[in-house]
Image: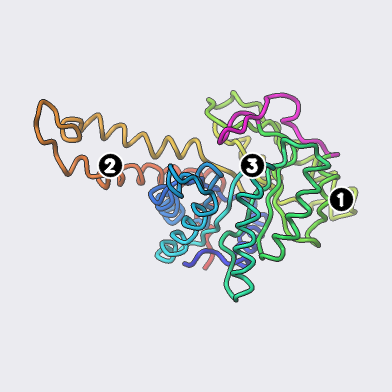
Amino acid sequence: MPIATPEVYADMLDRAKAGAFAYPAINVSSSQTLNAAIRGFAEAGSDGIIQVSTGGAEYLSGPTVKDMVAGSLAFAAFAHEVAKKYDVNIALHTDHCPKDKLDGFVRPLLAASTERVKAGGTPWFQSHMWDGSAVPLTENLQIARELLDLCQAADVILEIEVGVVGGEEDGVVGKIDEKLYSTPEDALATVEALGLGEHGRYLTALTFGNVHGVYKPGNVKLRPEILKQAQEAVVKSRGLAADAKPFDLVFHGGSGSLPEEISAAVDYGVVKMNVDTDTQYAFTRPVAGFMFTNYDGVLKVDGEVGNKKAYDPRAWGKEAEAGMAARVVTACENLRSAGTHAE
């Protein structure tokens, strides 16, 4: 199928919230990891989200070029072509963008999508993330409102972060302290600034102890009930139905999370969960195994000629893609999106 249109993406999110499941959002940084992610979604029978970070976008443009916009547009163009061969819907997203990179990443991409939409096409990306966790909440929401207006013009959904995710991603380090936990007051301030859809749709990453990076299960102290409290605070303040979930929530820093924590977060309105560290390992581990097993073919040992079939990048690349695709399937199963694709 073609990359999801804005209407298809909105329907994906609506179905996830109504059906109490969430989509894995898989970070990629190459054509191989992109293909692996799409394959995984197809094998799981799940629609999905594929995203690129600022560092991933730089890498996609060429490690010596480091042009985030060029890399992002190249990634999107490639994805639009290869996704046509699969029978699931794929949405494209850009991940964490801090304030100092907005002018070199999100704003130019929104401008490119706006021009594409004006010409009768669809946006390059279906959503973009503004990461305002490093600035005061008031400034965070002021910038978010400005970006929400730009997103609405481009027929794109905005993702914001309210609170701080600990750990490190692409050189951005979040302290592990009380700021890892969003408050009901944060939730109310968000709705006051951005509304409940009347100014444009947005996804909200409220933080409930999330940490980027590698952690054993149980080592990250998540409190999913914070998500429930945030939803309830808005329901009460706006007089909504008691069972309403006004926020479309995003789960960041999910590596090492326990299954019951993931399940609770989805029950409280999470529709998107970022997956990066686990799929990086799932891609690389088969390569390491292949190299150890076939070292005398990969290397020209003792003056021999090696084995071209072993050092052909496609040989170990296929192993890597299969490993990552399998981990995407697992993510879909954990988030209950497996088998939910609707024609």
The amino acid marked with disc number 3 is Phe
Q: Does the magenta segment cover residue 169?
A: yes
Q: Looking at this view, is 160 or 154 the one in front?
A: 154
* Observer able to see residue 255: yes
Q: Which residue is mark 3?
A: 251
Residue 82 coordinates in the image, percent (x, y):
41, 62
Whether residue 176 is situated above or below residue 343 in the rendered picture: above
Residue 131 coordinates in the image, percent (x, y):
68, 43
First along the sequence among labels 3 and 1: 1
The mark closer to the camera, 3 or 1, is 1
Residue 74 coordinates in the image, percent (x, y):
47, 57
Q: Which residue is mark 2?
A: 316
Residue drawn at (51%, 48%) of the image: 67
First along the sequence among labels 2 and 1: 1
Q: Tell me the quarter of the picture where residue 16 sits.
A: bottom right
Checking the image for residue 192, the label placed there is 1
Q: Tell me the quarter of the picture where residue 38 sits.
A: bottom left
* Observer able to see residue 257: no
First along the sequence among labels 2 and 3: 3
Residue 305 coordinates in the image, percent (x, y):
10, 36
Q: How many marks?
A: 3
| Mark 3: secondary structure | strand
Range covered by the magenta-colored residues: 166-185
| Mark 2: secondary structure | helix
Residue drawn at (59%, 46%) of the image: 95
The amino acid marked with disc number 1 is Glu
